[in-house]
Amino acid sequence: MKRSFFIALIFCGTWGSLQAQTAPPAPGKIDLILEDFSQHPERILVAAHRLAHTHYPENSLGALREAIRQGIDIAELDIRLTKDSVLVLMHDKTITRTTGRKGNVSSYTYAELQQFPLLHNGQPTDERIPSFKDVLLLAKGHIMIDVDFKADSEAAARLAYDLIKSTGTTRQILFFIYDYKDAAFLRRLDKQVPIMPRAHDAKETAAILKMDKFPVVHVDESFTDSVINDIRLAGSRVWINALGDFDKMESVTEDTGFDLLLSKYKQANVIQTDLPEQLLRYLRKRGLHR
C-alpha cells in the first residue's frame, strides 16, 4: 500500500515537472495589449498624450512609469535631436516651457540638457529630459509607444529605427508621420516597424488606403462616418483625439466629453487623451476595454 502511494507521488511529481517545462509562458502585459490591438477591433485602446503627465512632467520617465502603472495601452511621446545627435523626448522646439531655460533642443548636448530639471506645474522636479533609448528600455514588455517624430531629418529617422531595433521594441512601436508619403522611405529602413500615417481629408485617406495596409490611421475631427468606415473596412484602426474640447468637458463633468466623442465617432477605436486613467475607467464601465 505504502509502495503504491509513493509510486503515485513520484509519478505526479514527474508529470507536474514535465507540465511546467512544456506549458507556454503566461502572456505579459504587452502581449495582451498587442492581442487587443490586432485581434479585437471592437475594443477601444487608450493613448496617453505626452505620457501620463497629471502628476509628472510631460515626456518624462516618471510619466511613462505612471502610464504603465495605470494600465494604459499606448504612450504617445515626442522626439527631437540634440546638438550631439542624441534622440530625446521633447514636444517643443525649445526647452523654455518645460525647463524654464532658453534655447532649442538642438543647441544643447545631451549632457548639457541633463543639468536642467523638468518642470511640473511650473515647479522643478527630479525628472530630467530622457533619451529615447532609455524610454524604449523602460517601455519594453509593458506598453505600446506612439513615436511622434519631430526630429525632421532622414538621418534622425535612421537613428530612431536603429534604437528601436537594438532595444527589441519593434512590435511595440507606432511610428507617427504627418505626411503619408514619408512611409515609402521608412519602409525602406525597416518594413517591420509599424507606421501610423495622418490623414487630413478624404482624398488623403483614399491615397493612404491604396498605398499600403497600415495598422492604424490618425484622423481629424472633420472626418465623416463614411470615410472612417472605409478605414475600418480596410482592416486599420482609427485614431482620434479627445485633446482639447472633449477633454475639457470631461474634466468639468465626468462622462460628458467621452460620451460626446463616441457619439460623433462611433467607429474610432484608439483615443488619445490627456486624461488616460479617466478614459480607461470610462471604457471599462461600458465593456469597451479589456
Image: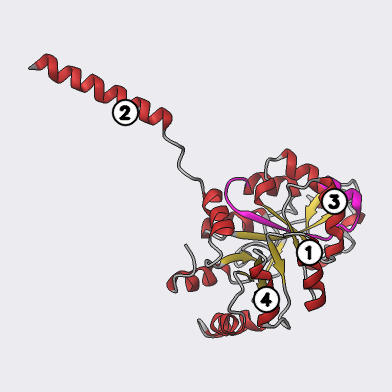
| Discs 2/3, front | 2
Residue 151 lies in the magenta-colored region: yes
- The residue tagged 3 is 157
Q: Earlier in the sequence, mark 2 or mark 3?
A: 2
Disc number for residue 91: 1
At label 1, counting other C-alpha atoms closer than 10 Å, the crowd grade (few under 14, some 14-19, many 20 or more) is many
Q: Residue 258, position in %: x, y? A: 56, 80
Mark 4 or mark 2, which has the lower sequence index? 2
Residues drawn in magenta = 140-159
Name the secondary structure under disc 2: helix
Marks 4,1: beta carbons within 8 A: no
Q: Which residue type does callout 3 highlight?
A: Ala
Eyeballing the image, is 230 above or below 170? below
Circle 3 SS class: helix
How many marks overall? Answer: 4
Query: What percent of the width, then of the height, locates residue 209?
Result: 76, 66
Tag 1: amino acid: His
| Residue 260 - label | none
Nearest to N terminus: mark 1 or mark 3: 1
Kindly identify which residue carries mark 4.
228
Q: Is residue 195 left or right of residue 106?
A: left
